[in-house]
Image: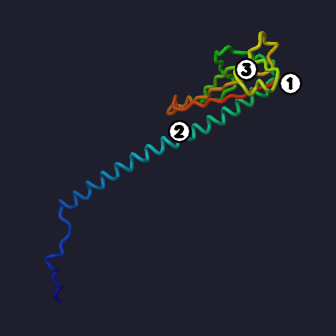
Amino acid sequence: MRLPRIATDERGFSLLELLVALLILAFVALGIASLFSHAQLTNASGYDYAVLASEARRALEDLLATPFNDAALVDTAGTPRQLTTARRGFDIRYTVQDFQVLTWNQLTSPPWPTPATAAEANLKQITLRVSSTTRILTGRREFVVSAIKIAG
């Protein structure tokens, strides 16, 4: 029995065509690989920012829960203090500024008057700066939040 003969116009790929196709595929794969690398860094940064916000909320709630005249809430005169209860991987610094507000109308139009003495203060503005100290994202994110604590 004789096998059918293949027509001459039905040839396979030449070696050159195969190499060109592989070269195009390599360039496309390289572009996609860089996208994965960038996406991984973006996801890690977004996660770190969400954790920073959560840590800032926790630290601010701790400070707001302290008594109004506690030593931790003494006016810092603009010099940041290190928060000692910060969790590992975070650097938390805060400032406290005292104000004396006598009427609610004063609250609607800052700047608020500063008291002559610490005993006259009836309002404190607490500002927290939380930054990451993780190896990859150090210095990439900083979360700043402020709150007001009223005496009484």
The CA span between labels 2 and 3 is 37 Å
Contact between marks 2 and 3 (CB within 8 A): the answer is no
| Quadrant including the N terminus | bottom left
Task: Of the two numbered discs 2 and 3 on the same chain, state the one appearing first in sequence.
Answer: 2
Task: Of the two numbered discs 1 and 3 on the same chain, state the one appearing first in sequence.
Answer: 3
Q: Which residue is mark 1?
A: 152
- Please state which amino acid type lies under the numbered disc 2: Ser
Residue 79's spot in the image, x, y percent?
A: 64, 15
Q: Which residue is mark 2?
A: 45
The CA span between labels 1 and 2 is 40 Å
- Please state which amino acid type lies under the numbered disc 1: Gly
> Circle 3 — which element?
loop
Q: Residue at x 48, y 41 (%)?
A: 41
In the displayed structure image, the side of residue 114 where residue 78 appears, left or right: left
> Circle 1 — which element?
loop
Q: Is residue 72 above or below residue 12?
A: above
Q: Residue at x 77, y 13 (%)?
A: 115
Q: Which residue is mark 3?
A: 112
